[in-house]
Image (spheres, helix red, strand yellow):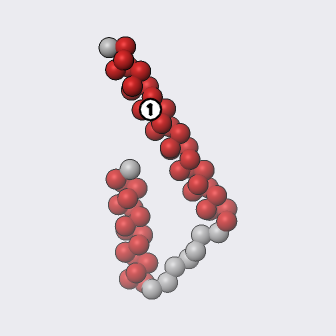
Amino acid sequence: MSAIGRNLNQVARVLQQEGRANVPGRAEVQTMLKIATGLKDHFRSLLAANERAWREW
């Protein structure tokens, strides 16, 4: 997650320096949402598995 934050900061810094931005289209935004949802679901499953492991221990 911190790597994603660093990358977003780098992108924001470049956009501020150049003064222009290419806005992502609908397809790119949908892809980003799909990736974010997949990461959220994966992380939720990871937390649930971790909780189960601790209960069994």
Label 1: few (<14), some or many (≥20) within 10 Å?
few
Q: Position of residue 36 (x, y in %)?
A: 53, 50
Q: Is residue 13 above or below residue 3?
A: below
Callout 1 secondary element:
helix
Amino acid at dot 1? Leu
Instruction: Please name whichever residue, 55 or 5, is drawn nearer the observer in this view of the structure.
Output: 55
Residue at 53%, 39% (x, y): give it: 41
Residue at 57%, 56% (x, y): give it: 32
Q: Residue furthest bottom?
A: 19
Q: Is residue 36 above or below residue 53?
A: below
Quadrant occupied by the C terminus: top left
Identify the residue under disc 1.
46
Left or right of 36 in this view: 28 = right
Q: Quadrant of residue 18?
A: bottom left
Instruction: Please name whichever residue, 14 or 54, is drawn nearer the observer in this view of the structure.
Output: 54
Left or right of 42 in this view: 31 = right
Residue at 37%, 59% (x, y): give it: 5
Q: Position of residue 39 (x, y in %)?
A: 50, 44
Q: Quadrant of residue 49?
A: top left
Q: Residue furthest top?
A: 56
Left or right of 46 in this view: 27 = right
Residue at 62%, 62% (x, y): give it: 28
Q: Position of residue 21 (x, y in %)?
A: 52, 79
